[in-house]
């Protein structure tokens, strides 16, 4: 099995590459432009493996994408490369449009031309998975019991989620129009090892560890449905292998938490694993909310569970324990990132470009 993973030097992409290379034994080509979010250190566990190779390239580069697919000759393409941070998309949306929308279009076209040229058997077996987010569905503000289904209408709030929604539509259209064998997955918030420390969970762990203030947006009442990244990687492998063509599969761990409860839980775990002079909850500070901050996301993963037999192996308590422990054990990975990244608050309108 030969698989191209775009965005494989990022958070979820690197978890997927580790799974495909080390657990499945597939031949994997990682393609990544190594933006601020891409990090070769996240691929350390597959470094030097004969079944892994890396291509430093941009998905917006049509020539490079055509050459990559025509040379590597993949059975599967798993597309994760994206600009992924909502706050950054508010401060400057251009890269989100160019990578998430134009880049996805460019990759789809390279894949389509390659697929068109395949022999009948290889053509029938080829698969393209477009990896997306539950944020395309908007916010579940009004009904605390409601869940995102695959049929929930798209209603994105941020430049990030709007760009992902656009790319989802492109992927679906390339299936309907050209008959390309495409599947789309929409996942809830991920957490786990190798997560860039601008996102809530790694930022909180590292600030708490260093005795710094723990910023919580608004009143901390926003709810996210957390999924351990390795559960997501297994889901993606299963969806591309057995998902029905042209379908969407929602991926989520049934682990809804208010942001403030996530932050408190991290403080409790850290206080136990690495005791400090006073409870780290004292470091919590409520700060100005994110503009257009969606109130609640929650995924119904029944289709993925019933149809494809996937199940999350971690719940939030076991996953967060593993995650905090990983950050305690792996300063070699996050230390250089903390030194090179100011942690400046992004996504406030008065500072927007
Ligand atoms: N993180 C989440 O909670 C979450 C949830 C659901 C879906 N997703 C989706 O999963 C995918 C991966 O998310 P992530 O959290 O790992 O993101 P990430 O920001 O950690 O990684 C993105 C990777 O893409 C690369 N990249 C960016 N622009 C590129 C370009 N033009 N060409 C080639 N590579 C480029 C970056 O260098 C980086 O390695 C994204 O498509 C995202 O929308 C993320």
Image (cartoon, helix red, strand yellow):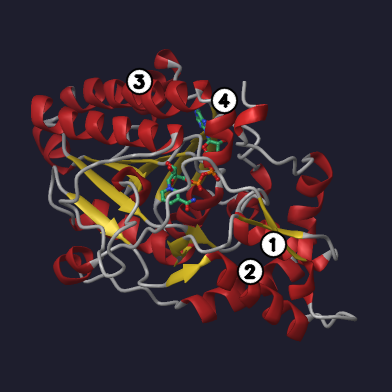
> Which residue: 75% across, 44% down?
343
Q: CA distance from mark 3 to mark 1?
A: 36 Å
Query: For the residues carrying marks 3 and 1, which lies nearer the camera in this image?
Result: 1
Label 1: how many Cα within 10 Å (few below 14, some 14–19, many 20+): many
Outermost residue toward the bottom in this view: 272
Provide the residue designation for mark 1: 204
The tag earlier along the polypeptide, 1 or 2, is: 1
Q: Is residue 81 above or below residue 146?
A: above
The answer to whether the residues at label 1 and label 2 have Cβ atoms under 8 Å apart is yes
Does the beta carbon at disc 3 come under 8 Å from ligand 1?
A: no
Provide the residue designation for mark 2: 263
Query: For the residues carrying marks 3 and 2, which lies nearer the camera in this image?
Result: 2
Q: CA distance from mark 4 to mark 3?
A: 22 Å
The answer to whether the residues at label 4 and label 3 have Cβ atoms under 8 Å apart is no
The tag earlier along the polypeptide, 3 or 2, is: 3
Provide the residue designation for mark 4: 92
- Can residue 118 be seen in the rendering of this structure? no
> Dividing the image into 4 quarters, which one contains the C terminus?
top right
The answer to whether the residues at label 1 and label 4 have Cβ atoms under 8 Å apart is no
- Can residue 150 be seen in the rendering of this structure? yes
Query: For the residues carrying marks 4 and 3, which lies nearer the camera in this image?
Result: 4
Label 3: how many Cα within 10 Å (few below 14, some 14–19, many 20+): some
- Position of residue 9 in the picture relative to residue 314 (left or right): right
């Amino acid at each position: 099995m030969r698989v191209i993973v775009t965005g494989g030097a990022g958070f979820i992409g690197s978890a997927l590459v580790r799974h495909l290379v080390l657990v499945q034994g597939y031949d994997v080509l990682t393609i990544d432009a190594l933006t601020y979010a891409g990090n070769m250190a996240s691929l350390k566990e597959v470094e030097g493996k004969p079944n892994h190779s890396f291509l430093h390239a941009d998905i917006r580069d049509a020539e490079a994408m055509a050459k990559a697919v025509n040379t590597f000759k993949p059975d599967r393409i798993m597309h994760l490369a994206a600009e992924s941070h909502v706050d950054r998309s508010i401060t400057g949306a251009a890269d989100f449009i160019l990578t998430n929308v134009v880049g996805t279009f460019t990759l789809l076209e390279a894949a389509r031309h390659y697929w068109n040229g395949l022999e009948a058997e290889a053509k029938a077996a080829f698969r393209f998975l477009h990896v997306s987010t539950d944020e395309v569905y908007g916010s579940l503000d009004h009904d605390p019991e409601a869940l995102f289904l695959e049929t929930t209408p798209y209603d994105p709030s941020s430049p990030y989620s709007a760009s992902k929604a656009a790319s989802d539509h492109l992927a679906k259209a390339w299936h309907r129009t050209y008959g390309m064998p495409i599947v789309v997955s929409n996942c809830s918030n991920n957490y786990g090892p190798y997560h860039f420390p601008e996102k809530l969970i790694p930022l909180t762990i590292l600030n708490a560890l260093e005795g710094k203030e723990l910023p919580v947006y608004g009143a901390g009442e926003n709810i996210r449905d957390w999924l351990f990244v390795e559960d997501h990687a297994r889901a993606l492998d299963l969806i591309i292998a057995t998902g029905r063509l042209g379908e969407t599969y929602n991926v989520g761990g049934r682990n809804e938490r208010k942001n403030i409860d996530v932050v408190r839980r991290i403080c409790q775990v850290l206080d136990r694993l690495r005791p400090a002079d006073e409870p780290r909850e004292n470091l919590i500070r409520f700060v100005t909310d994110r503009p257009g901050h969606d109130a609640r996301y929650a995924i119904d993963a029944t289709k993925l569970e019933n149809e494809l037999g996937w199940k999350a192996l971690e719940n939030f308590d076991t996953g967060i324990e593993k995650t905090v422990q990983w950050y305690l054990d792996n300063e070699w990975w996050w230390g250089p990132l903390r030194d090179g990244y100011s942690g400046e608050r992004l996504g406030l309108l008065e500072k927007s470009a």
